Image (cartoon, rainbow, N blue to C red):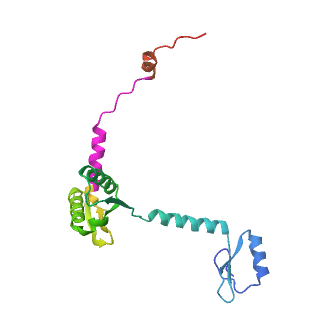
Amino acid sequence: MIDDEGTQVGVVDLEVARERAEEIGLDLVEVGPNADPPVVRILDWGKLKYEQEKKARESRKKQHTIDVKEVKYRPNIDAHDFEIKTKRARRFLMAGKKVKFTVFFRYRQLRRPELGDEVLNRVVEELADIGILESRSGMDGRRLVMVLAPNEAATRSAKSEAAKAAAAKPEARKPEPSEAAQSEPEAPATE
């Protein structure tokens, strides 16, 4: 048994250990069940559990999860659709997320995989200022896959430029409550 101050008391009968814990007002917790004889400790179980949960929360805060967003293209995508999907991918990269680009082929399109390569090359050219090519695979069944990671320096500068642009934009003047009340026509009184 280990007492509440952390000193080893030695081998003690279970009933004696329980009585000691009750006298102090703490719990008797088995910390070494596989030892011979089992090791027990006198401590505050609620406090121990709270500290363990607190450590777990702290470790979760320090974890850095990377989100991967996916944008899907077709080999014969229209120019407007390409622009919209590429703008969405740009927003994901600006937010610090990785983006997985997939070109999905159907039926006869499988005979012309170079069309998918052209689409992915256009994506890389469009997003070269903010994204870094992380991986590019060949044909994977009916799909051609590429992953872009955010370029940290470009992402930071783009965010600061966006913040400057938002700060420079003048806000619309909101009328004062007294002005709004004066400009509203009065409703006719009904009896």
Q: Which residue is at the front of the view, 3 or 144? A: 144
Is residue 188 toward the left or the right of residue 118 in the image?
right
Counting labels gives 0
The magenta region covers 155-176
Tell me if residue 30 comes above or below residue 90 in the rendering.
Answer: below
- Residue at 30% in and 39% down: 167
- Residue at 58% in and 11% down: 190
Image quadrant holding the N terminus, namely bottom right
Residue found at the far bottom of this picture: 36
- Residue at 79% in and 80% down: 15
Is residue 117 toward the left or the right of residue 95 in the image?
left
Give the x, y percent position of residue 150. Answer: 30, 60
Give the x, y percent position of residue 189. Answer: 56, 10
Q: Which residue is at the front of the view, 111 or 73? A: 111
- Residue at 30% in and 53% down: 85
Give the x, y percent position of residue 79. Answer: 23, 51
Is residue 73 toward the left or the right of residue 179 in the image?
left
Which image quarter: residue 191?
top right
Q: Which residue is at the front of the view, 132 or 140? A: 140
Q: Which residue is at the front of the view, 158 or 54? A: 158
Is residue 111 toward the left or the right of residue 175 in the image?
left
Give the x, y percent position of residue 36. Answer: 67, 90
What predominant SS class does the magenta segment belong to?
Answer: helix
Q: Is residue 148 magenta?
A: no
Which image quarter: residue 30?
bottom right
Q: Is residue 173 magenta?
A: yes
